[in-house]
């Protein structure tokens, strides 16, 4: 064994270098020992100094100048003088088979790359890195869930497109992901809220979700005291569905015509979705020309504009006035395609209009989170395990 101890500086708290076992260009192996004189018994907490035997534990450490570093920890097995049980000493510088600083590096690398890439980069197993990621994500999630949450954001995203889904829950005040619960069902959301406890749920004042009936049932069951608000993006998409149906009816040509649809109406499909206040003079003139040939399309576009004004209004009173104007256009009978939109609004009118009473919340933060999760899913070439997806998602966000 080499005795050149002074050439090695590990900078580990209360760890002494005994000697260098291997000092080669491709590897560095160092024997170390803890300087804690009397470790505590894990059961009784009493200091113990009676050594039963010693065993070498192999611990990986950070690389030095590109060389993998392995520590041979001369670990003691002690006998507790209070309970008589034997136990192996622990040390805060070590996390199982790696040092604590290497564990932190592995978790940090797993945020920017796949678990497999982080494991290969440091010469450790995938199972070891994944276990560290799961443990760290559990600590982060537990810390986040203990905080008070006034605004809760709820939305679903796919773990595997059109096959598996998760319910993502985000603290609207901080933007932190609280959990990613398997499935997007009433049981999934209700189970999470039940696990959080009554006191935590009582602190939730506003819940923002998409138009899922399953989520609504869980919110009514567990958060009946909170105001339930529908996300603006999903509501506007419902409103736009009426205009899309009206445009498709208008653009159809008689059977046998070539092309089968009116090119001018079809070419204006994206322009029709624009709000009136977002159009310039040329775009407005193009729409006016289109509306002269199709009055029903003008009525549908104006009705959608009034529904947009529901969110542009300063207060609930202004939103109701915009809603009345849109209803007047619907009563003319020119836009029967809006019947589904009207039925949907009647079913969710309380959750839509409460948007003005709750500080105008939205799921913008959770949509950003979902984008990050989809990038993570593509980077990992899809996930099949819900737990791994949740832990990586919490770590990434």
Image (cartoon, rainbow, N blue to C red):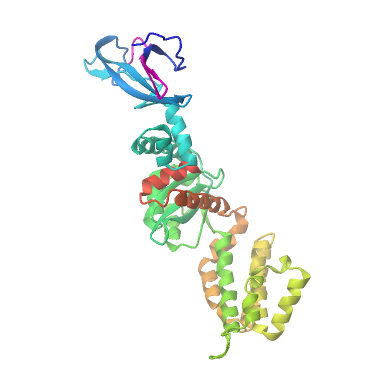
Q: Is residue 241 above or below residue 350?
A: below
Is residue 31 one of those drawn in magenta? yes
In the shown orientation, is residue 130 left or right of residue 254?
left
Residue at the extreme left: 84
- From the viewer's perspective, is residue 97 above or below residue 322? above
Residue 76 lies, in percent from the top left, at 29, 15
Residue pictured at 21% horizontal, 15% vertical: 84
Residue 323 visible (yes or no): no
Does 180 lie within the magenta span? Answer: no
Residue lying at 46% horizontally and 15% vertically, measured from the top left = 9
Image-quadrant location for residue 219: bottom left
Extreme front residue here? Answer: 25
122 to 334, vertically: above or below: above
Between residues 268 and 2, which one lies in front from this camera angle?
Answer: 2
* Residue 113: % across, % down: 47, 42
Most foreground residue, 370 or 184: 370
**From which residue to which does the magenta span run?**
21-40
Q: Quadrant of the N terminus?
A: top left
Answer with the quarter of the image where residue 392 lies: top left
Classified by dominant secondary structure, the portion drawn in magenta counts as: strand
What residue is drawn where x is 62% and y is 81%? 331
Percent of width and height locating residue 110: 45, 39
Residue 244 horizontal/vertical position (percent): 58, 75
């Amino acid at each position: 064994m080499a005795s050149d101890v002074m050439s090695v500086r590990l900078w580990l708290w209360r760890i002494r270098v005994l000697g260098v076992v291997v000092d080669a260009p491709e590897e560095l192996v160092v024997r170390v020992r803890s300087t804690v004189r009397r470790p505590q018994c894990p059961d009784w907490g009493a200091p113990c100094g009676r050594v039963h035997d010693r065993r070498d534990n192999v611990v990986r450490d950070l690389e030095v100048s590109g060389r993998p570093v392995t520590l041979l920890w001369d670990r003691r097995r002690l006998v507790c003088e209070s309970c008589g049980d034997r136990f192996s000493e622990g040390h805060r510088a070590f996390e199982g088979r790696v040092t604590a600083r290497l564990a932190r590096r592995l978790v940090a690398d797993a945020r920017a790359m796949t678990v497999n890439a982080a494991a290969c980069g440091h010469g450790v197993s995938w199972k070891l890195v994944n276990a560290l990621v799961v443990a760290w994500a559990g600590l982060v999630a537990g810390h986040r869930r203990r905080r008070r949450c006034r605004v809760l954001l709820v939305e679903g995203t796919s773990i595997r497109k059109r096959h598996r889904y998760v319910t993502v829950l985000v603290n609207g005040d901080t933007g932190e992901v609280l959990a990613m619960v398997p499935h997007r069902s009433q049981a999934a959301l209700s189970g999470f809220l039940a696990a959080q406890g009554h006191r935590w749920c009582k602190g939730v004042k506003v819940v923002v979700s998409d138009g899922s009936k399953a989520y609504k049932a869980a919110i009514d069951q567990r958060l009946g005291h909170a105001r339930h608000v529908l996300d603006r993006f999903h509501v506007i998409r419902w409103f736009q569905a009426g205009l899309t149906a009206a445009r498709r009816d208008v653009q159809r040509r008689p059977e046998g015509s070539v092309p089968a649809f009116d090119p001018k109406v079809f070419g204006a499909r994206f322009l029709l979705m624009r709000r009136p206040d977002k159009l310039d003079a040329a775009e407005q003139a193009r729409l006016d020309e289109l509306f002269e040939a199709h009055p029903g399309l003008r009525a549908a576009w104006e009705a959608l504009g009034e529904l947009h004004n529901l969110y542009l209004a300063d207060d609930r009173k202004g939103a109701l006035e915009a809603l009345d104007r849109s209803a007047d256009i619907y009563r003319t009978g020119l836009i029967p395609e809006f019947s589904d939109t009207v039925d949907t609004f009647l079913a969710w009118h309380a959750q839509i209009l409460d948007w003005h009473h709750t500080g105008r919340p939205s799921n913008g933060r959770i949509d950003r989170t979902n984008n990050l999760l989809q990038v993570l899913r593509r980077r990992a070439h899809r996930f099949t395990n819900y737990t791994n997806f949740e832990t990586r998602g919490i770590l990434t966000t």
